[in-house]
Structures are given as C-alpha cells and as structure tokens.
Image: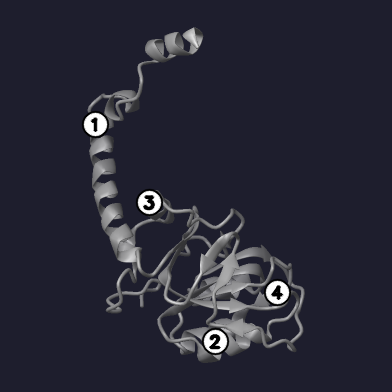
Amino acid sequence: MSSQGESVDSGQPGAGAGGHSAATLYEAAGLECACRPGLRPSWAGARIAGLAYPVAGIGGDNLALHHAVAHAPAGHVLVADLQGAAHGYWGEILTVAAQQRGLLGLVIDGGVRDIAELAALGFPVFASSVTVLGTGKEHQGRLGQPIALRGVRVSTGDLIVADVDGVVVLPAAEAAAIIRRADRRLQHEKQIITGLRAGRTTVQLYGLPDRDTQVDAEQAW
C-alpha cells in the first residue's frame, strides 16, 4: 500500500491503475464510468486507486461504515453511498480504525469531518461535503453489494480511481484492458506535447479541420 491510497502489487488485475489519472482512465475506458461532479479530496494531494468495497447506508446514520471497516478486506477502498446527506459520517476515529485494517481510502457521497487529522494521518478521503454534524448509529445498511455512486454502478472488486479531477469506476472484468489502453494514450499524449514544444499546433497534431474550411462548410450549411 502506498501513502496515497494506492494498491501496489496486489496480484489482482487492474489494482493500482498503473499510476494513471482519473481523466486518462476515463478517456481510455470508453464507458460512462465517471461519477457526477462533487466528490472532492478532503486534503490537497489525496489520491486513491484500489479495489472497491461498496457500502450503502441511511442518511444521518454511520453504523454501516463502522461495520464496513470491520468487515472489508485489507487493500480495498470503501465506496459509500449515504445519499449525499450532509452529516459527518467519517472522521479521525474511523480513519485510524481503517488504517489498522489495511484499507486504502474512502469515497463517500456524504459528509466527513476532522479534515486536519485525516490529512495528518495521510488517509485519502473523497467526499461530497465537510460538516461537523453528527450521526446516529442504528441502521445496519448493506455491505459488499452493488451500489450506485453518483450515477455509476459500483461492485466489489471494481477498480476505483479518485484524484483532484474526479472519480472513475472501472468494471473489474475490464480494468486491466483499460489500463493498457491508458498506457498507449499516455504515450500518444507525450508525442503531442513534444510536437507542441517543436512549434506545431493542436490543429495540426490532431488533424483537426482547417478553420477556413470549417467556416466555409458551416456557411454553406
């Protein structure tokens, strides 16, 4: 496990995401795998790349998260749907508990708190809000079953990658192939940047329509 919430040499296809960004993986995937905007890193530089363990809870109650920390396999990322409700479901105590269990991070459609402590502990958390509001502890919720996280289905073992640009979920069966395509995409982007520094334009490098030709076509239309 790296300090940035990334699995390393787990022996499972796709774990670690090859160091690729969420944006690169999204473009390489060719799938609707990007969660709707709003899940933000709780501290600067946080990044997650690992296998998902889904959690579904009830707004205003965090008992499901306590059970998830106790039951999720080491090396996984908790991915929790709390319906976007603005309560502080997660803080320093659950972070220490999760680290002791070998978990890589948390992505939650809901609120968190103790942000300074999370940053000091180096535990990456992506959440939809930050709030001091507390929670109840009554509802069991669901663990390890598929959820919908901001418009994207998440199942146990899917590859989840989160960084400052957003959160993507890659289906387990396709993650390794997507990472290979991302490798090729990254090499192509390096070639584009080399061409730009040599004085060429993005219009030339991407083979985009010449502006005069496009204007003529639009006027004709």
Q: Position of residue 221 (x, y in %)?
A: 50, 12
In this view of the protein, which residue sits in the foreground, 183 or 41? Answer: 183
Q: Amino acid at mark 4?
A: Gly
Q: Earlier in the sequence, mark 1 or mark 4?
A: 4
Disc 4, SS: strand
The Cα atoms of the two marked residues, 1 and 2, are separated by 48 Å
Residue linked to disc 4: 88
Disc 1, SS: helix
Q: Earlier in the sequence, mark 3 or mark 4?
A: 3
Q: Amino acid at mark 1?
A: Gly
Image quadrant in which the N terminus is located: bottom left
Q: Earlier in the sequence, mark 2 or mark 3?
A: 3
Residue linked to disc 1: 195
Q: Position of residue 198 (x, y in %)?
A: 22, 28
The Cα atoms of the two marked residues, 1 and 4, are separated by 48 Å
Residue linked to disc 3: 24
Q: Could one spot residue 4 in this view of the protein?
A: no
The Cα atoms of the two marked residues, 3 and 4, are separated by 31 Å
Q: Position of residue 53 (x, y in %)?
A: 49, 78
The Cα atoms of the two marked residues, 2 and 4, are separated by 16 Å
Q: Position of residue 72 (x, y in %)?
A: 49, 86
